[in-house]
């Protein structure tokens, strides 16, 4: 990853609130053409991500609309501890240097990996926003348009701006996906024999 992007990366992923719009991509190539026409800055492309979601055996985090995830990304080597909820816009992440040790610590505290999600992800910057383009086996292709902030009063304004950006990229309201990858994966697991 280019050194010049490090301050931008920190700025893009700093905050405890996240406005995120997710869209299904029936034609990923068409979306990439629209995105590339806007000349985004590339953070990384075709990274493989492995997310392990943790909860106690009583599923207390899930019941409280919270999630705890350890994410490992290759080949970038980025490792994150991510907590979301209970509000839908609440999201905090921190870089960690040893995912194996973090998972061991969670196991020691009684947490179990209750769900694993693997995806291929590319991340781009367009101005103040970051966009991820994901492929999840069994679920399909998605684009997430997002911004993080510490100022909760800006969330509604950012949502309006992201909706406009989505339209500029050729995404329609019919393509919106309101479920998280975790919820989509759990639903898929329930319907798969």
Image (cartoon, helix red, strand yellow):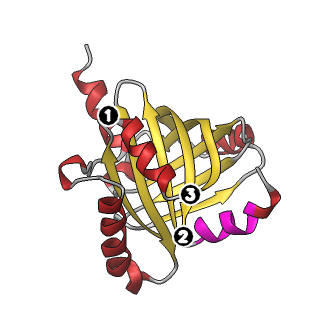
Q: Looking at this view, is 83 or 56 the one in front?
A: 83
Where residue 173 appears, x then y in whole percent?
20, 55
The earlier-in-sequence mark between 3 and 2 is: 3
- Residue at label 3? 40
Q: Residue sitting at 64 percent across and 46 percent down? A: 44
The secondary structure that most of the magenta stretch takes on is helix
Q: Residues within 10 Å of mark 2 (few under 14, many from 20)?
A: few
Where residue 89 appears, x then y in whole percent?
38, 67
Q: Residue sitting at 27 percent across and 48 percent down? A: 177
Q: Is residue 95 magenta?
A: no
Tell me, yes or no, whether the two marked residues, 2 and 1, touch with CB atoms within 8 Å.
no
Q: Looking at this view, is 65 or 12 the one in front?
A: 12
Q: Residue sitting at 44 percent across and 44 percent down? A: 33
Please, is residue 162 above or below residue 113 in the view? below
The earlier-in-sequence mark between 2 and 1 is: 2
On the picture, is 17 further left or further right than 181? right
Label 3 sits on a secondary structure element that is loop
- Residue at label 1? 186
- Magenta range is 5-14
- Residue extending furthest top? 193
The earlier-in-sequence mark between 1 and 3 is: 3
- Spatial separation of the CA atoms under disc 3 and disc 2: 8 Å
- Residue at label 2? 127
Quadrant in which the C terminus appears? top left
- Spatial separation of the CA atoms under disc 1 and disc 3: 33 Å
Please, is residue 119 above or below residue 150 in the view? above
On the picture, is 192 further left or further right than 125? left
- Residue extending furthest right? 3
Where residue 111 appears, x then y in whole percent?
54, 42
Q: Quadrant of residue 74?
A: top right
Q: Residue sitting at 22 percent across and 23 percent down? A: 191
- Residue extending furthest bottom? 153
């Amino acid at each position: 990853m280019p050194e010049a992007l490090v301050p931008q990366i920190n700025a893009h992923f700093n905050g405890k609130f996240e406005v995120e719009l997710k869209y299904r991509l029936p034609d990923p190539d068409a979306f990439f053409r629209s995105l590339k026409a806007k000349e985004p800055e590339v953070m990384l492309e075709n990274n493989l991500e492995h997310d392990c979601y943790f909860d106690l055996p009583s599923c207390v985090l899930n019941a409280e609309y919270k999630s705890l995830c350890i994410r490992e990304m290759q080949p970038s080597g980025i490792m994150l501890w991510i907590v979301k909820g209970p509000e839908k816009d609440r999201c905090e992440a921190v870089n960690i240097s040893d995912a194996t040790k973090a998972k061991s610590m969670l196991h020691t505290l009684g947490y179990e990996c209750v769900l694993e999600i693997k995806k291929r992800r590319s991340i781009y910057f367009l101005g103040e926003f970051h966009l991820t383009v994901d492929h999840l086996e069994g679920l399909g292709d998605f684009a997430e348009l997002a911004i993080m902030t510490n100022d909760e009063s800006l969330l509604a304004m950012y949502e309006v701006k992201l909706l406009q950006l989505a339209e500029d990229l050729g995404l329609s309201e019919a393509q919106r996906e309101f479920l998280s990858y975790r919820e989509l994966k759990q639903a898929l697991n329930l319907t798969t024999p």
